[in-house]
Image (tube, coloured by chain):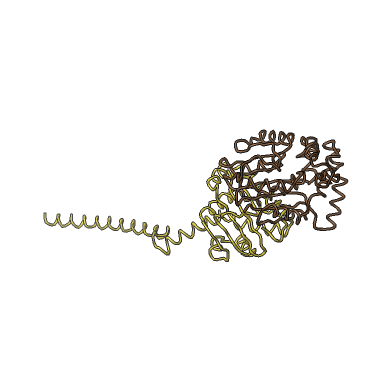
Chain colours: A brown, B yellow
Amino acid sequence: MSDKDTTHFGYQQVDKNEKADLVAGVFHSVAARYDLMNDLMSVGIHRIWKRFTIELSGVRQGDSVLDIAGGTGDLAAKFARVVGKEGRVVLADINESMLQVGRDKLLDTGQLGNIEFVQADAQYLPFPDNSFDCITIAFGLRNVTDKDKALRSMLRVLKPGGRLLVLEFSKPQNELLSRAYDAYSFRMLPFMGKLVANDSESYKYLAESIRMHPDQDTLLEMLEDAGFTDCNFHDLTGGIVALHRGVKP
Amino acid sequence: MSQLISPTLHTAALAALEGAANRALQLATEARSELKELDGCVFALECTSPEFEVFVQPLQGELRLMGVYDGTVTTRVRGTASDFTSLATAADPASSLINGALELEGESAPLIELQHIIGRLDLDWEAPLVNTLGDVAGHQLAQLLRAGFSWGQQAGTNLGRQLEEFIHEEARLSPPKLELEDFYTDVQDLALRVDRLESRTARLKKRLQDKDD
């Protein structure tokens, strides 16, 4: 198998055609406990990172927003409130289980009317060109098989002047923090995964996939290469997470 | 956004404060409905030294606090931390706002309306911010918000007093209450004297008639 035909799944090299199924397996397994695990793993800070993403999105009443890999609907619920009745939020996720959990959660909390649910692959977004004022993908890009293809697909469906926000784990900027973070993610995460979701392997994948994800500067270049302009990023919590932003010219 | 406070902390502090404000609003039905009238407005408090900004957006009867906002702002209050502190601790905030170094940009009426609503909530700005940011940064941000939004009630009273003085003393559009009371006393006194004069005239008239008879 040539390098072109393979990609990484955590620390493993796998056939490109297999990655989507492997990732799907991970998320089918953790979907029911996804929110709880996120809160436990990040000590609730993921809510702050997502809140900052919404602030930087510049989304207004009446806007149209696509939340890719929207999972359990954290961002979609908040965007729905900001865009109001005249706006539109599409929660898209490739994984049926995650989408089901997100849809149930939003319906149970009365979030209706301006949210649509779509099962979609980020690499082949099933929307017309120039459809959205803003696209977000939070903790999803690292699971996509071909990230460049996904970024180009996002650029296509964004309206000119629209913004893409990529919230993703990144590289801590401090050596001490980096070591502490390594110890935490390779020892504590699988342990917590075993305890709460009865699945240590999926959380081992999570830790590995974070290390394999492009660092801040590389992802910035990828955004520019895909055709976005005014690209920049903010390090959050010492660079454990970074929020990248690009604008469609 | 703050250059001193990390985005995570800044966002966390505003999230804590927003939660406290919206919990208070849950118990204030009237304030919630008044706040809905301000939907679409965005208010900015900009501290120039040290640099940080807070944006406040009324949204469907709740408050949204943000560290970043790049849309059109309805009203912006700009100044240094000490300018905001002076306003927050002033005995007469209205006069401090008029005579102080703070700059006000945009429409003032929606800001005053928001101040009245928030003023009635009697919010504790300090606790949620200090818990998240620590004593120094938390206190500084609380001062900014207190200056921007909590002087509304007192300012309303003071502005009322200043307006009354203007009508009475400067424009002389209406006499002050004491002057008016003096005037009424004088009128009553005059009325009594007129009555007495009328009685005396009547008596004199009667005497003259008696003499003629």
> Foreground: B58 or A87?
A87
Residue A222 horizontal/vertical position (percent): 73, 53
Give the vertical position of B5 relative to A118 (above or below): below
Q: How many marks?
A: 0
Residue A111 horizontal/vertical position (percent): 64, 37
> Foreground: A1 or A152?
A1
Quadrant of the rendering where the N terminus of chain B is positioned: bottom right
Please give the name of the residue rendered at 76% of the width and 53% of the height, measured from the top-left corner. Answer: A237
Residue A224 horizontal/vertical position (percent): 69, 55
Pick out the residue farthest to the front: A2
Residue A110 horizontal/vertical position (percent): 64, 35
> Foreground: A205 or B71?
A205
Query: Residue B83 falls in which quadrant of the image?
Result: bottom right
Res. B127 visible in picture: no
> Foreground: A12 or A50?
A12
Determine whether, in the image, residue B43 is placed left or right of residue B182: right
Give the vertical position of B94 relative to A209 (above or below): below
Res. B194 visible in picture: yes
